[in-house]
Amino acid sequence: MKTTSEEPRLPFPTKPLSFGGEEIEEYVIPEEKRAEVLKQLYIFGRPPALDEERLDLHTGKTFRVRDYRVTRERGRNWLLSPFVEEGGGSVIDWMPVGRRRKA
């Protein structure tokens, strides 16, 4: 996927993450900054509370929102589920627990 513009980097260190044969970067976000980063990157209006549970549609696993991960790929910052290496989804694939996408 090509992006048309590059986003500014977040002000946090990164560590390498191998995913799908590609080397990308994962931000190391301090606990005290997680709510702020979630608010900045969440694309659906008001973000959920850090202690809310969400379902990752790709893995079928639940997680606490505070366990989200952020990567830097192709000049953009991506808000992901904690299960990214298992095929976990981005924020568009997070559902409130108890709700499933209709087929």
Image (tube, rainbow, N blue to C red):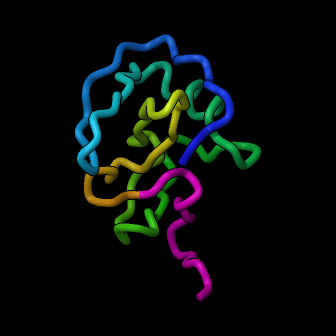
Q: Residue furthest right?
A: 45
Report how many numbered discs are placed on residues in the image: 0
Residue lying at 57% horizontally and 42% vertically, measured from the top left: 2
Q: Is residue 91 magenta?
A: yes
How far across and down, in percent of the image, does residue 71 sit?
Answer: 42, 34
Q: Is residue 17 above or below residue 33?
A: below
Q: Residue at x 27, y 45 (%)?
A: 19
Tell whether 86 sits left or right of 99: left
Q: Is residue 84 magenta?
A: no
Q: At which x and y percent is residue 72?
A: 44, 30
Image x and y of residue 32, in percent: 46, 19
Classify residue 25 as left or right of residue 56: left
Span highlighted in magenta in the image: 89-103
Judged left or right of residue 80, residue 3 is right
Give the percent coordinates (x, y) of residue 13.
36, 13
Which quadrant of the view contains residue 49? top right
Depth check: give the residue in front, 27 or 38: 27
| 84 w.r.t. 6: above or below | below
Q: Please state, as top left, top right, bottom left or bottom right, where the C terminus lies in the image.
A: bottom right
Q: Going 62% across and 85% down the picture, which residue do you hit?
A: 102
Q: Main secondary structure of the magenta part?
A: loop
Query: Residue at point 51% right, 38% down?
Result: 78
